Amino acid sequence: MDRRPRTRQRTAWKPARLPEIKPLLEATDNGHPVVVPAQRFASPRSGSDWGPYAETFLRLNEEAFKALGARGQVVGTSFGQSVQIVPGARAGAIPLKSAVTDRVAGGLLVRSRFGWNGIGRLLCETGWHASPQLLPLATVPGSAREVPAWVLAGPILARLERLLKGLRPGYTELETTLLKPRGRILWESYVTGSLVHGRWERLPCRFPDLSKDPVLRRYIRWTLESVLLDLHRAGRLDPVAQELAELANLLIRQVVDVLPLAPRRDDLRRGRAAGLLSKEVYLGLEAMMWVIDERGLGGGNERDGLSWALSLDGLWEHYVESVYRREAASTGGEVFAGRLGQTLFPLHWTDPMHRTLGHLIPDLMVRRGSSVNVVDAKYKAHLAEVDEVGWNRFEDEIRDSHRSDIHQVLAYASLYEADDITATLVYPLRLETYLSLRDKGHDRSYADLMHGGRTIRLELRGLPFGSPHAPH
């Protein structure tokens, strides 16, 4: 029998492999193109030259580019082919697939040139009607910590607020013990419970109670508390997050009578698939599903965030509309909005086969007595650039774009008959630029155009992007 001591076989120590950090490319809306590194999204041995991988990369990411309003392009350089992404007028985050593996190898984050705080302020002032849109794409590596918590928390709270307002009463069967009879007395329970114990005055009853759906309200409370926790954890120094936290607390007070209950994704999915749901309930259930994912709310502990996009053009139009509605309310004006179809003018072509445009839709029309103000909101930096560099130093492309804006709003103004007509282009300004221009009286500029015995006043107006309050 072999009695030699056994020796434990030693294994070589291997350091733990750290998870691969996937690159997050960053850009600014309508800004300079972003160069995509070939080593990370093509072959590691390709250097800076994409070679045969460029077209494959653009094809695999075409859907994501389109969702974010971006454009991919191949540019020839002295080192070979270079792939660039040209950002558009949308902020958001999308995943980027590798041209070799067809798997997510990184992401793209497009910020607003006015910063997150500017976007947050405008979203708060417009009631989050132009909210970020979630995209049916994979999560974006590294984006969750780069995006403020309120990017998705705001839309969630806005949806739940509308859901609470729109909940319709419904009958719920309750069973409890009362001192006065209500509904149907449960005699068997009364005999075996109350009577044998000498509590003859206690009556077990079953009755219909007119109340709002208790289970849905428990779901809502759980979702509100989850969002509030994210806002407290990630946005203590963020004024937009603090404002949303106050809203979350106000909404929680409306459901304080029920205990929180975490919804299950399958239950929410079945609920959304059911017919006859109101719009408020459908969107509210969708918002709860976002929170159940436990990722992508921004600013949290997760690295990967959900894919999303926000039209900055649409956000700016909503904000300008809110400013003009406030002004009209104080001056007795009436506002008509293009997004509601109130300013639509169909174009009747002699040959429908060759029509290039079906209708004209000014963003806003404000009527005060016999005067008409036609307003077109433009998310462009033209007014600030005129102030900084002057018209003569404008680039030809920007100058042509500005002329096109003027021609467009004047065409809109020609559709109306009134004694006094003003055509206004409204451009965004940083708050400090707006204050500087306002102090010099340059936040508005005018020009009178006379044609055929008719005078139209052309107005260029700047409004601050992201100021807490609209200017007076």
Image (cartoon, helix red, strand yellow):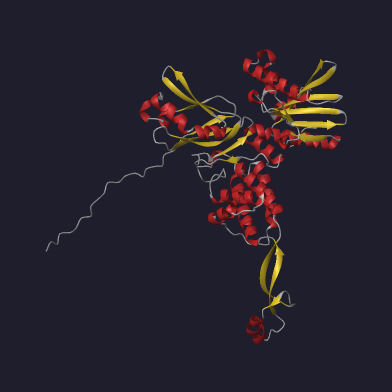
The answer to whether one can see residue 185 in this image is yes
Question: Where on the picture, by quarter, is residue 399?
Answer: top right
Q: Is residue 175 above or below residue 239?
A: below
Q: Position of residue 54 (x, y in %)?
A: 43, 26
Q: Is residue 401 above or below residue 67?
A: above
Question: Where on the picture, by quarter, is residue 145?
Answer: top right
Q: Is residue 200 above or below residue 24?
A: below
Q: Position of residue 371 (x, y in %)?
A: 85, 28
Question: Where on the picture, by quarter, is residue 417?
Answer: top right
Q: Is residue 445 left or right of residue 151?
A: right
- Asked whether 209 or 236 is in front, the reply is 209
Image quadrant containing the C terminus:
top right
- Asked whether 440 or 156 is in front, the reply is 156
- Asked whether 457 or 82 is in front, the reply is 457
Q: Residue furthest left?
A: 1
The answer to whether one can see residue 47 in this image is no
Image quadrant containing the N terminus:
bottom left
Q: Is residue 314 above or below residue 216?
A: above
Q: What residue is shown at x 69% (from left), y 37% (from top)?
A: 122
Q: Position of residue 152 (x, y in %)?
A: 60, 43
Q: Is residue 130 left or right of residue 58?
A: right
Q: Position of residue 32 (x, y in %)?
A: 55, 24
